[in-house]
């Protein structure tokens, strides 16, 4: 089940060099509905997707820091849905988690989302009702919150990375979204990779042009491993949050599901020379995920390292010394399993859990239990030690607040909302629990989240 090289190349030759134009997101409506989109190369059938406003990815929502986002979700699908605004320090009631912060919006109904945007940065929105299937079918889009003093770049480009598992014969999504084999292993991996809904995404640029690239990993399970060719880059933000100092991109960029990275890149390639965002492919080669076509040059000369982005409010984690460390053990999955898990009030062994389509546990809890993993008093410092006792990597995401990693010597890492924890590794995260409400802490490999790797915390 793959796209043949010959057909793929034929498709490439035939494909017009259209540029993805972001639709203006001025409408107060965000309509979840079916649409037909040409995801596969020309010559292959089009794909029936679930979209926001008929687009894949959904419309780019771009607002100023400190402003208010207002959207009425209209559900024109035949299934219930809801929208989560990933990475936003949001009012709990607007967080979009069906079954925890709101009821799913039934077909034909609507729900009004309205909330402030306290932090600048690169975020995204996606379905949070049966997200394993709904996000894979296309329900996600970028959410950009602009700094009041944006950095000095020639252009700002949003690149939403994704992969789709398609049947080349029919163009439809292949297999069953709940496939237990995938859910108990690394997750649903696509056979076609792309950016902004295109497998052949490309950008025009000039030599010495300075671009801000906002990369968002919207894939269900794929960890993108990326490299720059013909460009010199600096990482200026992770998961929306500015780094104190830009860091030169010297090695691979690892982007786990739901993670974002903001790069400032200078196009160093001369006209006609190769430049690209390369992605490590399953066959061990580096493929251009985004081609950068260098046409002409700017009048500018090379500029050197960029200045840091302006910081967002509330960047530090204080009070570490007095905080209790709670351990959240990640267990389960193929090749390892778990001793036992507590599943909605019952103690079941691994075999019984597997029969219920549940393969994973967080802190002994399989799926969303009635009680939170931890309760915090508002303003309390939280420390959680994530221990990955499985043979798979997991992208752990906390809703409502960003955290920092804390190294063994107490050094704090950059602020993130999603952390990749590799097999047999551990990592401590810490944050000031200052946003009241019920917040999910789950794996963003969405098949894992649906089969047990979902827990939550409560801030009173
Ligand atoms: Cu991006 Cu709970 O999700
Ligand atoms: Cu996982």
Image (cartoon, rainbow, N blue to C red):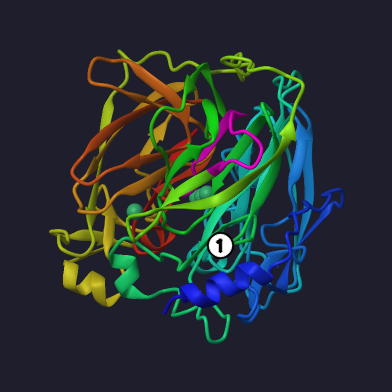
Task: Give the quadrant of residue 361.
Answer: bottom left
Q: Position of residue 363 (x, y in %)?
A: 26, 47
According to the picture, the residue beneath numbered tag 1 turns out to be 135
Mark 1: give few (<14), some (14-19) or many (20+) Cα within 10 Å: many
Q: Is residue 253 left or right of residue 294?
A: left
Q: Is residue 166 left or right of residue 62?
A: left
Task: Give the quadrant of residue 227.
Answer: top left
**Residue at 63 percent of width and 31 percent of height:** 121
Residue 287 is covered by the magenta coloring: no
**Residue at 75 percent of width and 68 percent of height:** 109
Residue 275 is covered by the magenta coloring: yes
Specify the segment rendered in magenta. 257-276
Q: Nearer the viewer, residue 119 or 291?
A: 291
Would you place residue 295 above or below residue 199 in this image? Answer: above
Q: Position of residue 82 (x, y in %)?
A: 63, 59
Residue 237 showing in the rendered view: no
Q: Is residue 160 left or right of residue 193?
A: right
Residue 175 showing in the rendered view: yes
Displayed-image quarter of ligand 2: bottom left
Would you place residue 4 above or below residue 442 in this image? Answer: below
Q: Quadrant of the N terminus?
A: bottom left
Q: Nearer the viewer, residue 267 or 176?
A: 267
For this orientation, the residue located farthest to the bottom is 169
- Secondary structure beneath dot 1 equals loop
Would you place residue 21 above or below residue 183 in this image? Answer: above
Q: Position of residue 374 (x, y in %)?
A: 36, 38
Q: Nearer the viewer, residue 210 or 337?
A: 210
């Amino acid at each position: 089940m793959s796209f043949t090289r010959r057909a793929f190349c034929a498709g490439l030759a035939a494909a017009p060099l259209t540029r993805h134009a972001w639709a203006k997101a001025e409408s107060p409506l965000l309509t979840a509905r079916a649409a037909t989109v040409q995801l596969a190369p020309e010559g292959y059938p089009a794909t029936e997707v679930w979209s926001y406003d008929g687009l894949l990815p959904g419309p780019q929502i771009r607002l100023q820091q400190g402003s208010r986002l207002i959207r009425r979700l209209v559900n024109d699908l035949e299934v219930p849905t809801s929208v989560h605004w990933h990475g936003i320090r949001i009012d709990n009631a607007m967080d979009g988690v069906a079954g925890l912060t709101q009821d799913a919006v039934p077909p034909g109904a609507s729900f009004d989302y309205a909330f402030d945007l306290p932090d600048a940065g690169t975020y995204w929105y996606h379905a949070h009702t049966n997200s394993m299937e709904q996000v894979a079918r296309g329900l996600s889009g970028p959410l950009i919150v602009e700094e009041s003093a944006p950095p000095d770049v020639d252009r700002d480009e949003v690149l939403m990375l994704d992969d789709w598992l398609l049947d080349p014969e029919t163009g439809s999504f292949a297999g069953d979204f709940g496939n237990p084999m995938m859910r108990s292993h690394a997750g649903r991996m696509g056979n076609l990779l792309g950016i902004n809904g295109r497998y052949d995404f490309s950008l025009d640029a000039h030599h010495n042009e300075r671009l801000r690239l906002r990369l968002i990993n919207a894939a269900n399970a794929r960890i993108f491993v990326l490299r720059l060719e013909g460009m010199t880059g600096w990482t200026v933000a992770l998961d929306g949050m500015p780094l104190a100092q830009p860091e030169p991109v010297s090695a691979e960029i690892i982007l786990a599901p739901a993670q974002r990275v903001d790069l400032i890149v200078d196009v160093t390639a001369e006209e006609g020379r190769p430049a690209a965002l390369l992605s490590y492919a399953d066959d061990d080669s580096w493929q251009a995920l985004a081609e950068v076509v260098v046409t002409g040059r700017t009048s500018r000369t090379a500029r050197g390292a960029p200045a840091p982005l302006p910081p967002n409010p509330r960047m530090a984690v204080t009070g570490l010394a007095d905080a209790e460390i709670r351990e959240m053990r990640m267990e389960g999955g193929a090749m390892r399993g778990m001793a036992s898990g507590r599943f909605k009030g019952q103690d079941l062994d691994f075999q019984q859990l597997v029969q219920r389509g549940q393969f994973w546990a967080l802190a002994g809890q399989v799926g969303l239990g009635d009680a939170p993993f931890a309760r915090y008093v508002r303003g309390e410092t939280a420390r959680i030690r994530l221990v990955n006792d499985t043979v798979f990597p997991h992208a752990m995401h906390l809703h409502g607040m960003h955290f920092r990693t804390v190294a063994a010597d107490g050094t704090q890492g950059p602020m993130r909302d999603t952390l990749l924890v590799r097999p047999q590794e551990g990592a401590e995260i810490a944050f000031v629990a200052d946003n009241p409400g019920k917040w999910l802490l789950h794996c963003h490999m969405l098949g894992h989240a649906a089969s047990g790797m979902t827990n939550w915390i409560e801030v009173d």
